[in-house]
């Protein structure tokens, strides 16, 4: 990964406390771990600090392969803050049931964790702790921290192994997530600046419909299909303007500097309503390069054909 955190960006807020999956994902990025890292108590607080200029960068989860979008992140970026995504990071998620020393599974009648983590372990909890009370915390690591500070012999936390090591807890059951393919996607955000293209990028945007009429979504999607631009995510969210009023959050392969992407965004803005640009940034993984290359070649061929026709216009 190229150094995308330049010297003038030295502070980074992330969902804390220490031991969260967010921190785990952060530590896969060598150029970010050398920054001044500042744990924050909630995802909205991460973004608030970036907007207020208290930190240069923010890092938070945006999507999980099992539970879908992290709505607080999506909505903050779409409606509440003008921030730009700088990169995405994807990690595999292994969830563990942890307890204070001496607590057994038979003792546990209360489980605490972040809501997304609890949802990812529904099946395991139903099979092994069907009668346990389930309570939400601000993060997985916060559940572990609270348990370590006030052990009661009956409470367990669901959190990453990093949290057990950080807070001195015992892992009672490992890898309790219901689906082994569990992954979470995180985004790095800043108040301004678009990273240069890498050849394997994503662009994120929010499209607000100009009018609620039959075929409006089809018209939006046709802009991508006509240019062979692959959407990697499409999601509707209420606009907060009343029932039935929705906008569309989209991720697509490609960068703003790509001619096809720029032309698509231009048409969306011109014909279909307001468009909020959330960023063009390096994508995780390596899929999509061949498709975009083929689409670019086809576009260049079409441009050449059109230029040839125009050259024959009599002056």
Image (spheres, rainbow, N blue to C red):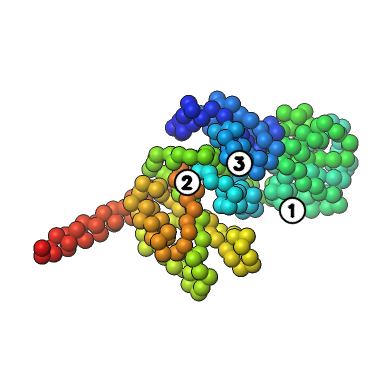
Who is closer to the viewer here, 97 or 207?
Answer: 207
The tag earlier along the polypeptide, 3 or 1, is: 3
Q: Are marks 3 and 2 in contact (CB under 8 Å)?
A: no
Who is closer to the viewer here, 53 or 153?
Answer: 53
Q: Position of residue 111 (x, y in %)?
A: 81, 44
Q: Please give the label number shown on residue 123.
A: 1
| Looking at the image, residue 41 lies above or below residue 271 | above
Who is closer to the viewer here, 237 or 63?
Answer: 237
Q: Nearer the viewer, mark 3 or mark 1?
A: 3
Q: Are marks 1 and 2 in contact (CB under 8 Å)?
A: no
Q: What residue does disc 2 label?
A: 279
Q: What residue does disc 3 label?
A: 47
Q: Quadrant of residue 313?
A: bottom left
Q: Position of residue 175 (x, y in %)?
A: 70, 42
What is the secondary structure assignment of the residue under circle 2?
strand
Is residue 48 toward the left or the right of residue 273 in the image?
A: right
| Looking at the image, residue 8 lies above or below residue 227 | above
What is the secondary structure assignment of the residue under circle 1?
helix
What is the secondary structure assignment of the residue under circle 3?
helix
């Amino acid at each position: 990964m190229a150094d995308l955190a330049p010297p003038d960006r030295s502070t980074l807020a992330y969902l804390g406390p220490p031991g969260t999956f967010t921190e785990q994902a952060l530590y896969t990025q060598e150029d970010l771990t050398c920054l001044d890292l500042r744990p924050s108590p909630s995802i909205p607080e991460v973004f608030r600090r970036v907007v207020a200029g208290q930190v240069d960068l923010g890092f938070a989860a945006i999507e999980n392969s099992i539970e879908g979008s992290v709505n607080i992140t999506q909505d903050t970026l779409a409606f509440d803050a003008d921030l730009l995504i700088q990169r995405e990071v994807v990690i595999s998620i292994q969830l563990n049931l942890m307890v204070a020393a001496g607590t057994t599974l038979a003792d546990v009648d209360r489980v605490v964790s972040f809501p997304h983590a609890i949802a990812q372990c529904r099946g395991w909890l139903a099979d092994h702790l069907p009668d346990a009370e389930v309570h939400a915390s601000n993060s997985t690591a916060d559940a572990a921290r609270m348990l370590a500070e006030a052990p009661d012999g009956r409470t367990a936390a669901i959190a990453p192994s990093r949290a057990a090591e950080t807070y001195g807890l015992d892992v009672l059951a490992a890898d309790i997530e219901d689906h082994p393919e569990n992954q979470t996607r995180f985004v790095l955000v800043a108040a301004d600046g678009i990273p240069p293209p890498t050849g394997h990028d994503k662009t994120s945007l929010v499209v607000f419909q100009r009018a609620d009429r039959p075929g409006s979504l089809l018209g939006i999607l046709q802009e991508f299909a006509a240019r062979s631009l692959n959407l990697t995510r499409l999601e509707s969210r209420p606009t907060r303007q009343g029932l039935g009023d929705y906008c569309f959050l989209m991720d697509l392969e490609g960068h703003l500097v790509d001619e096809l992407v720029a032309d698509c965004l231009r048409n969306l803005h011109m014909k279909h309503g307001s468009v909020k640009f959330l960023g063009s940034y390096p994508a995780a993984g390596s899929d999509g390069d061949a498709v975009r290359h083929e689409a670019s070649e086809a576009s260049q061929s079409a441009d050449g054909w059109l230029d040839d026709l125009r050259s024959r216009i009599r002056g």
